[in-house]
Amino acid sequence: MNGAFLDYYRCPDRFATFAFSGGLSEDSGYFRFGLDTICYGRSCSGRRARSSTDELHDVMQEIKVDGSTLQIPFSPSEVVANLRYERYAASSNGGGKQLSAAPALRKAYYKVRPILPLSLRKHFQRICLRDWEDIPFPHWPVDLSVEVVFEKLLALLLKLHGVDEIPFIWFWPDGFPSCAIMTHDVEGLHGSKFCSTLMDLDEAHGIKASFQLVPEGPYPVSSDFLGSIRDRGFEINVHDLNHDGLLFSDRELFLQRAERINRYAKELAAVGFRSAVLYRNLDWLEALDFSYDMSVPNVGHLEGQRGGCCSIMPFFIGKILELPLTTTQDYSLFHILGQYSLELWERQINLISKNNGLVSFIFHPDYLRETRAKDTYKALLAHLTELRSAGILWMTLPREVNQWWRQRSQMRLIRRGNRWEIEGAGKERARIAHARLEGNRVVYRLESPCPAGPANRPQLPHCCATSQ
């Protein structure tokens, strides 16, 4: 029950002294962990509701202290996995309609999609997604449920052990408060022809991105096209197989296509994957030979498949690292919400960065050719550049996040004399942080970098508040 907590913080095992306060129920359902945090799973007592909108039992009042052990009425690892893997959505259909809920309808839609004008596609999608504002859970526009569960447990452990601080390995390299990645999904022929212009826009702001290419799509994935992207320092990943929306519609079909997708991954030397339209089944991903995936939204209100992982941090799905999509897609903002301002994106960036998370974007070259969309994107790039210059964001490629998060997952804190030290590959970029309580609020303090560290290491604020 301690595994997910320890993996998240990379703190010494001796601080994570959890135990069950009783036997876990056979059924799973919704309950609260404090007034503001919704969980899904089994619990040791109380009622588990079938819907997040029901009156929910609060398990906080049932937490007990037994010497140096914190007895809690649920498994943190199970509850967090249920959120990350969207298992709660299976019980409630994600709180609303799903385009993916009717395979026959989805198959028919994607068969005619290439000949449908954008105006008709937008109209159809707006009808299907019209109830998005009525979905109570996950929380719009950013859901921090996983992070809040961990922070509440950390606060309880600080009180239990009677210590001023608990050390852990900071989330991002070089002490950066948060991270951001830009990704481009190339869907059609017009989008592929716009990639060079899009790279010009990115490079004008000193930003590199990953391009997700459809290997059996409507445009040629030639060696010249691949070289034009790689030679400029951008990354190439695989985007589904043929973008027909059916990859996860059937297990046997998925396995057949997974073999072809894996062959393309080797041919393209791609280590990352994203499915079409963010359709997904996380229990099937093990069949894909990728180092990381980018198919799970934080909040799926405006996606064809509702749900969301309720987290703003990378997390492992077996051997694959998930880099969740934590902001609204360009298509959804422009064509579903009908907005061309930065207001929503700025709000999401602010929430994620204040909580030390991963700010991840999807922009499609297919939809950025129009002047209003392009101007909005340029304004966002300028905003991200300002945040990077202020030391708020580590702006990098997805593959770099994957490499760092894998290194961090193998690091550990050891005690030498009167100080903590980090062991493991990549430790020269890692920083020790300390969590402490200010009232009932968890705040983080970063240790100053070692004098022998890189001279260009950013000097960043040493106190980072992370509660909602």
Image (cartoon, rainbow, N blue to C red):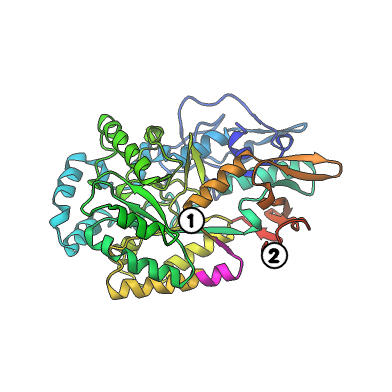
Can you say whether 65 is above or below 165 in the image? Answer: above
The answer to whether residue 374 is magenta is no
At which x and y percent is residue 178?
57, 58
At which x and y percent is residue 308?
41, 47
* Image quadrant in which you'd find residue 126: bottom left
Q: Residues within 10 Å of mark 1 (few under 14, many from 20)?
A: many
Q: Magenta stretch?
A: 385-394
Q: How crowded is mark 2: few (under 14 residues within 10 Å), some or many (20 or more)?
A: few
Left or right: 377 in relation to 459: left
* Image quadrant in which you'd find residue 394: bottom right
Q: Residue at label 1?
A: 397
* Count of numbered badges drawn on the protein: 2
Q: Nearer the viewer, mark 2 or mark 1?
A: 1
Image quarter hosting the N terminus? top right
Q: Earlier in the sequence, mark 2 or mark 1?
A: 1
Indicate which disc residue 127 carries.
none
Can you say whether 236 is above or below 59 in the image? Answer: below
Q: What residue type is labelled 2?
A: Gln
Residue at image coords 47%, 65%: 207
Q: Which is nearer the eye, 263 or 41? A: 263
At which x and y percent is residue 17?
70, 33
Q: Which amino acid does label 1 sit on?
A: Leu
Indicate which disc residue 459 carries.
2
Q: Is residue 169 visible?
A: yes
Residue at image coords 62%, 59%: 176
Residue at image coords 54%, 72%: 386
Dot 1: element: loop
Dot 2: element: loop
At which x and y percent is residue 212?
35, 52
